[in-house]
Image (cartoon, helix red, strand yellow):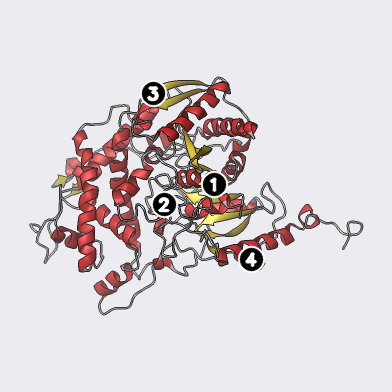
Amino acid sequence: MSLRNEVLSSYEILDVRGSVVRSLDHIKELEGGQESLNAFLAIADPEDLEPYDRGPLAGVMVALKDNICTKVLPTTCGSSMLKGYRSPYEATAVKRLRRAGGLIAGKTNLDEFGMGSSTENSAFGPTLNPVDRSLVPGGSSGGSAAAVAAGYVRMALGSDTGGSVRQPAAFCGVVGIKPTYGRVSRYGLIAFASSLDQIGTIGATVREASLLLEIVSGHDARDSTSVQKPVPSFKDAVAQGVKGMVIGIPTEYFPEQLDPPVRALLDEACERLIDAGAEVRPVSLPHTEFAIPCYYVLATAEASSNLARYDGVRFGVRVPAEGLERMYEGTRGNFGAEVKRRVMLGTYVLSSGYYDAYYGTAQRTRASIAHDFKTAFNEVDVLFTPTSPTPAFPLGERVLDPVAMYLSDVFTVTANLAGIPGISVPIGAVGGLPLGAQLLGPWWGENHIIAAAGALEASYEEDI
Amino acid sequence: MSISAEDVKRIGELARLHLDTDELERLTSDLNAILQHVDSLRNLGSTKPPEDSLQSGSELQPDPQEGVEGPDKLLETPVDFAPEWQEGFFIVPAPPGVNPSEDL
């Protein structure tokens, strides 16, 4: 075969397939060895790769969180309940990225069914943070963030129900985007809390995370919550800059307890935005203090309903027992401790007599939180906040203290409750550990937050 | 609000989760800690969100398209015709064998 007498595609000329096969072998070697991060639960076989040779992602390997359905590889949700489960269909987001030429590198580890903030709640063991293997990578999309941070892939898909893309991106020093609720189809995303779940993207840079988001976004008739809105060019927004942009600093997101080194890095990032041409002003989001309780009532209520299907009849690895009820209970014993805790809490808050005290109040609080954002976005274009109160914490530190673990999400859950987009972008390190800043935008305002994150990223690149 | 091990056992039955003694003890402690935190919501009491606040998802609805019918408003709301109505639910007679007084 030669260029003279054959029509060859760029894919063949550059031997993309050979390069991808070598990369997959390399990932398998690293993940199978003693230095494994346990970022992947399954790695693609070269024979599974389809010969897509055109499109903006031609030949680019993308990792997928293992709660996003694929036909070729199993989809386990990090749970013994779905061990070996193979979906009969694939998620719309996966179809879109394959059509764009992307190649599925494998499925990444996660907290069981997306329930957690550290990727320690996986039935297949925790993922380690590639920056420091004694630390958690964040969660629940910890496997995806670790895979990008370790350089296994440049891009990955995650899902974000309360910060599960942005917080691990911050802990691992990469970029994570949660789009507006309805921007990306949830068809084929295994449900945790349907009114909060959204597929998000993780990239080594703002441009890569934005490009992947642009590819997977758009209306899908198979998801009734996916919205018919034109998808702008997110990758073009990266270089738009922040000149004239008004950035709000919500006072509630900068409590006195924030560690001084964390605050110092955030202040510096703010200065950089001002230097790049943005105007910064304080704003107030008064219902922020109620966000965590509100989130944990609504998310667990929805989870208890969504996870009712894992009974050994409809879904789940059946545990045979005498009698139907015992079989149900035996099968649902496959759930891990955190899933059981949340299903229990969700069942309680929905039970007769407590429904309005918890669920009803939480729904009204959710509306007030969304109203806070609506009011703020009348004055400013984007909001600047920490992604997480701290950098990555040690493995095992918060496993036995659910409330401490839940509080890791204090700055991220509000975006899910309101349905607005958010991005986490690295802004340096505290004690050698990456720290992320979060930019929140109005509904359908991904372009604004991507532009601001792009300006911040460019400012740090100038230092190098 | 605190819950007892007996309450947790009953919730486990509703959720179809078998809980052994250790799990029951741990979950009772965990749920009480979480509910103590969640109870801060009660500080809001029955305060209604502002009139112009977003009801969940209202900002996110697709733009109405020409020629596409939307759902009609109900002439009567369920409250108007329900024999009994509480917290957004119809109240119906208990099924045979269920004692409604055995509440959580």
Tell which circle, 1 or 2, labels the residue nearer the N-terminal end.
1
**The C terminus of chain A, quarter of image:** top right
Q: Which residue is mark 2?
A: A394
Left or right: A156 in relation to A226: right
Q: Compared to A40, does B1 lie above or below? A: above
Q: Which residue is mark 4?
A: A48
Where residue A196 sits: x, y (%)? Answer: 39, 45
**Identity, as a three-letter code, of the amino acid under mark 4:** Asp
Secondary structure, mark 2, is loop
Q: Which residue is mark 3?
A: A283
Where residue A213 sits: x, y (%)? Answer: 56, 43
Secondary structure, mark 4, is helix
Tell which circle, 3 or 2, labels the residue nearer the N-terminal end.
3
Q: Compared to A244, does A103 lie above or below? A: below
**Quarter holding residue A257:** top left
**Quarter holding residue B17:** bottom left
Which mark's residue is nearer the viewer, 1 or 2?
A: 2
Using the numbered discs, state the Cα–Cα distance from disc 3 to disc 2 in whole angstroms: 33 Å
Where residue A11 sits: x, y (%)? Answer: 76, 55
Circles 4 and 1 in contact, beta carbons < 8 Å: no
Residue at 53% from the left image edge and 30% from the top image edge:
A448
Which mark's residue is nearer the viewer, 4 or 1?
A: 1
Tell which circle, 1 or 3, labels the residue nearer the N-terminal end.
1
Q: Which residue is mark 1?
A: A202
Using the numbered discs, state the Cα–Cα distance from disc 2 to disc 4 in whole angstroms: 37 Å
